[in-house]
Amino acid sequence: MEIETVFVRAPAFAQMLGYAIEVYKRECTGVLMGDIFGSAGKVVVNSVVALQSSERRYTSVEPNFRRYARIEEVLAFLSWDFIVGEFHSHTDFGGIPPTCRLSEDDREYIRENREDGEVEIVVALRKKKRARGWRYVRADSILRGTLGEYDVEIGAYFKASEDDDGTLAEIWVPITQIANIAAEEHLSPQRGYIFGEIPEQFPLPRYRKLVRLIRMYEDKLIRTQDPDEGEELLDEITLLMREIASISEIYE
């Protein structure tokens, strides 16, 4: 099965980065929940469940498969999503710059444990040297940016056939575009966050509208796979962010 694009929704993105940062510099892993749309060549990741009992090391991580089976049983009962793969992190332990490329151990794990069409997302973390916005590196099919004190790189792979050990797919995370707009409007103290703080003077109904627009933008991008389709929504989002910025300046 060929997967061209892996879409990661905002909650899943936050969960992955939160788990990875929490245990930095050790590696971590978790289960990806969502759906595989084989005919459209895409996977949508809606949420992530951490495998907390995994054996975390500085240069590797190994799930506890007996406990993993417990999680699979519960998720099958409680979630309307499906398990679509796993994610794990790489860090800069030992001063070696981390990469979201698969190691030989990663490839062996994919070959032995992934089903056709399932994905493996790799999150590479290291202490940042400078702040930068989120951007897609098309040549490498990865997403790169900074979040708080960390440089982040994310790559997605899928299992194309029974003997495949990981084929690179394009990864799209729509919420990072919103984070870039927030940074341009000086709403986040460090690049990577959407907001530093929402002023109390900004009406709650307007904030709710902003959240709804962001969700609509994410849904449209995932549905159409065409960034141009969301331009009108981005314009509305930008106007509301400028409104927040103007209030923040008044009340500083």
Image (cartoon, grey):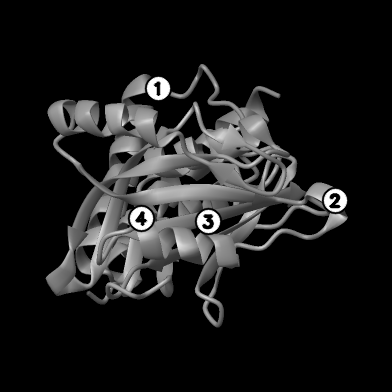
- Disc 3 residue crowd, few under 14, some 14–19, many 20+, Cα 10 Å: many
Neighbor class of circle 2 (other Cα within 10 Å; few <14, some 14-19, many 20+) is: few
x, y (%) of residue 191? 67, 47
For label 4, the SS is helix
Between the C-alphas of marks 4 and 1, the distance is 49 Å
- N-terminal-most mark, 4 or 2: 2
Circle 1 is placed at which residue position?
203
Q: Which residue is mark 3?
A: 122
Kindly identify the amino acid type of the residue bearing the numbered disc 2: Gly
Q: Residue at x 30, y 62 (%)?
A: 230
Residue in the picture at 34% in, 52% down: 85
Mark toward the start of the polypeptide (2 vs 3) = 2
The C terminus is located in which quarter?
A: top right
Marks 2 and 3 sit apart, C-alpha to C-alpha, by 19 Å
Residues at marks 4 and 2, CA–CA distance in whole angstroms: 29 Å
Q: Residue at x 37, y 41 (%)?
A: 31
The residue beneath circle 4 is 113
Q: Amino acid at mark 4?
A: Asn
Q: Is residue 245 visible?
A: no
